[in-house]
Amino acid sequence: MNCIDIGICVRDDNEAFVPAKTMSFTPLCFVPVGEPLDLFNVIKWLSDMQMDNVNFVMDSKTINDDFHSNKPDVSESGHANQGARDSFIHNS
């Protein structure tokens, strides 16, 4: 299947399992673009559930560094990261 699948697991302050969700997206894209798009959708999902004060744990140092960077990036992945950052700021 030509899609991207992600899994999300939320834990509380005591590391106890709260909700989880899987999501699928099309079209298939490169990892540097797909991962920030995934983060954008996770932020939206948490906002829709009215969850705030959330710490994110990701397995991508690059996406984490890019998310927290102030350097302009006009690439596809930079645009996707900006969308995730804007969503996070808007929903905070």
Image: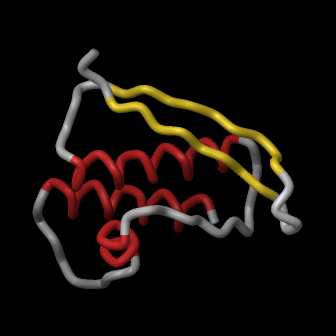
Quick one: 52 or 57, which is closer to the camera? 57
Q: Residue at x 86, y 55 (%)?
A: 16
Quarter that holds the N terminus? top left
In the picture, measured across the screen, residue 72 lies left or right of residue 51, that is left
Color style of the picture: secondary structure
Q: Residue at x 69, y 38 (%)?
A: 20
**Relative image position of residue 25 (x, y in whole percent):** 37, 28
**Relative image position of residue 50 (x, y in whole percent):** 76, 49
> How many numbered circles are shown?
0
Quarter that holds the C terminus? bottom right
Q: Residue at x 54, y 47 (%)?
A: 42
Work out whether 66 lies above or below 7: below
Most extreme residue toward the top, as rendered?
A: 1
Q: Quadrant of residue 52?
A: bottom right
In the picture, measured across the screen, residue 78 lies left or right of residue 50, that is left
Most extreme residue toward the bottom, as rendered?
A: 70
In the picture, measured across the screen, residue 9 lies left or right of residue 24, that is right
Quick one: 71 or 8, which is closer to the camera? 8
**Relative image position of residue 3 (x, y in whole percent):** 30, 24
Work out whether 38 lies above or below 77: above
Most extreme residue toward the left, as rendered?
A: 75
